[in-house]
Amino acid sequence: MANQKSVLKGAQILQNIEELKQRRFFHLELKGLTKPTRDILSELVNGLLEEIGANPLAAFHLFSGLMEALLNAIKGNIRHIIFRDELLKKIEKLGETQEEAEELLEIIMDTSPLRDAMHRYVVPDKIKKQVQSILQLEDRIRAKKQILKDEEKEFLTDIRFKLKKNRMRISVKIKITKDELNFRIRNDSPIHNMDFGRIEESRIRHKELFDQGNSADFFRPEFLDEKESAGFGIAMIDEGYYTMGLNPLDLLTITSGSRTTTVYMRYPLTALREMSF
């Protein structure tokens, strides 16, 4: 975590938590969402919410939304690495040398229309299953309930290496202004245009249900989009806003570039303080 004057690591953040809660701006860089990382975020964010006098129920919905946004960022980076791998295999089959294939891959990844067009050559379900497998393996390691098989260890090690090699990071900026508590979550992978369109459409459907007094109905099977990256995590964050009496279409913004996805989450301080059980 960094501000303009200091850089602190996990243990140092916890040691200085009382002082840090008095600050108005934070910049954190995360490697993942391990239990120690979640504990540090909980201490920091919930400490800030106590300092600004947030209602405990509002604090719960905000922190839950932040965790969903971070999980989305992690999944996005993993998905991107797997997509790159699958696409590189397809290019190499065309007879390109390793160097030529990698150069062509970088051109495709930097060009949005080309990147989107390549989706037809990569099976979405295969990527979805691999992302789920990685998250499940990480959970098993954290729970210490099962010993991983050699092929599972190799698969996880390979993904971790590629995430590091491609410098796939997640950064979080937290800022408190006179009127709002703001979060900016950025990960080093783009949202593909088709997925982005589905997310926006699903958010509008969710808002329509909220206007009818039935926002929770969005999570029923007839409304959920089962396609990968269709925005379930974002819907969970939106529902938290609705529960707090806020319009997420005004307060949660998603942007995507050629290499990054950024989520901006704004929470008016008055809403955080005044929410009632």
Image (cartoon, helix red, strand yellow):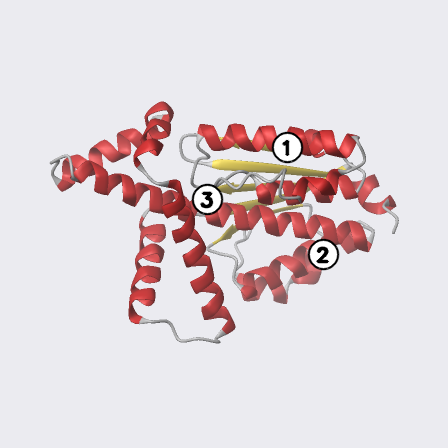
Nearer the observer, 162 or 122: 122
Q: Would residue 275 appear left or right of 64 to someone viewing this image?
A: right
Please indicate whether residue 14 sits to the left or right of residue 128 in the image: right
Residue 187 image point, x, y percent: 48, 42
The residue that label 2 is drawn on is 46
Of circles 3 and 1, the one toward us is 1
Residue beneath label 1, please?
A: 203
Above or below 161: residue 203: above
The residues tagged by marks 3 and 1 sit, at their Cα atoms, a distance apart of 19 Å
Return the x and y of residue 183 as percentages of the image width and height.
63, 42
As drawn, is 25 to the left or to the right of 9?
A: right
Mark toward the viewer: 2 or 3: 3
Q: Residue furthest top?
A: 113
Label 2 vs label 3: CA separation? Answer: 26 Å
Secondary structure beneath dot 2 equals helix
Is 114 on the left or on the right of 185, as rendered?
Answer: left
What amino acid type is highlighted by mark number 2?
Asn
- Graded by Cα atoms within 10 Å as few (under 14), some (14 to 19) or many (20 or more), the crowding at tag 3 reads many
Mark found first going from the N terminus, 2 or 3: 2
The residue carrying mark 3 is 76
Image quadrant assignment for residue 266: top right
Label 3 amino acid?
A: Gly
Quadrant housing residue 116: top left
Of 156 and 99, nearer the camera is 156
